[in-house]
Image (tube, rainbow, N blue to C red):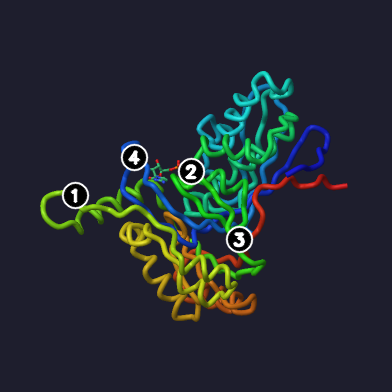
Amino acid sequence: MTGKRAGDTVTVRVPAKLNLQLAVGPRRADGYHDLVTVYHAVSLFDEVTAEPAGRDGVTVGGEGADQVPADRDNLALRAAAALRKTLAGRSAGAGRVHITIAKRIPVAAGLAGGSADAAAALVACNELWDGGLSQSQLLEVAARVGSDVAFALLGGTAVGRGRGERLTQALAPATQYHWVLAFADGQLSTSEVYAALDRLRGRGGRGDGPREIAQPELDAALMSALRSGDARLVGRTLSNDLQSAAVSLFPALRKTLAAGLELGALGALVSGSGPTCVFLAASADRALDLAVSLSGAGVCRSVARVTGPVPGAVVVPPAR
Ligand code: C5P
């Protein structure tokens, strides 16, 4: 996570995430749900630049920029403020900062783009301010900023527990997986999808009382598939407890998922809280075929081919 500094500007590249498993437990007293999830970072990146400024500010450009708050509610700016607080008394250089976000990860798409930008801001400001925090110290700050922020720092493939912030890197072989992402013509709010899941589960209960929801558990079949590096097995073991809730709010996704499977995907699922749909392909060539066919089928707004796993947030070396 170390890098060079060009003058007083630091740029960090940060990946989107998929959830290869997303097991959701009962709603907790604080409104969150306990999770067991298998995160997987893929090659769709935002770039975040931090530079000293007279006051804190943020500029957002690129894909969906007009839907990202450009004020103190911005998650990247909140992450910078959280880091500054952590560094108080430790680093003389933790001053005001302007953050510029170049977005390629679609907003409110189930790909944790906002969390990615927050993770990138942590890495960039730690560098800019000579904060000297280790990765594990940055992970602690990240966990306070949002559920998926810590994973965007770590990257690779990792098991997340708690709200998703308690991470263990998965020891998978160096297999590269080929994915096709189908971006939807619309967005979903994460909290609304969780609320829809609670409603669906409530309705499925018997008798008067609420149904007992089991604690989430890691899928041993998926972990064994990842250890084998066999994409066919991985495709068969993808799962997402939020999928039915996302589809209930965005019924067109049913057609998108079915089309990808008909066109030969090894597996298909909604990414996180959606509405992006994710398809696993057997090879780079198959991914290209699938992407072209999905585009032609008119079941999504646009498609992208990505590979994973990729590393988490890293400083971009300055151009010479
Ligand atoms: O942590 P984050 O801000 O990304 O979460 C957004 C919303 O998603 C939360 O306010 C909550 O409604 C829901 N959520 C949840 N359980 C989780 C993660 C998120 O209920 N583990």
Dot 2 corresponds to which residue? 147
**Numbered tag placed on residue 31 in the rendering:** 4
* Label 4 residue SS: loop
Graded by Cα atoms within 10 Å as few (under 14), some (14 to 19) or many (20 or more), the crowding at tag 1 reads few
How many angstroms separate mark 1 from mark 3 (CA)? 38 Å
Graded by Cα atoms within 10 Å as few (under 14), some (14 to 19) or many (20 or more), the crowding at tag 4 reads few
Graded by Cα atoms within 10 Å as few (under 14), some (14 to 19) or many (20 or more), the crowding at tag 3 reads few
Q: Is residue 29 left or right of residue 168?
A: left
How many angstroms separate mark 4 from mark 2 (CA)? 13 Å
Residue 175 in the image, given as x and y percentages of width and height: 64, 69
Residue 42 versus residue 282 in the image, above or below: above
Residue 184 in view (yes/no): no
Give, as a three-letter code, the residue at label 2.
Ser
Dot 1 corresponds to which residue? 210
* Label 3 residue SS: loop
Dot 3 corresponds to which residue? 171
Residue at x 35%, y 49% (from the top left corner): 194
Residue 159 in the image, given as x and y percentages of width and height: 52, 54
The answer to whether the beta carbon of the residue marked 4 is less than 8 Å from any atom of ligand 1 is: yes
User: Disc 4 or disc 3, which is closer to the eye?
Assistant: 3
The image quadrant of residue 149 is top right
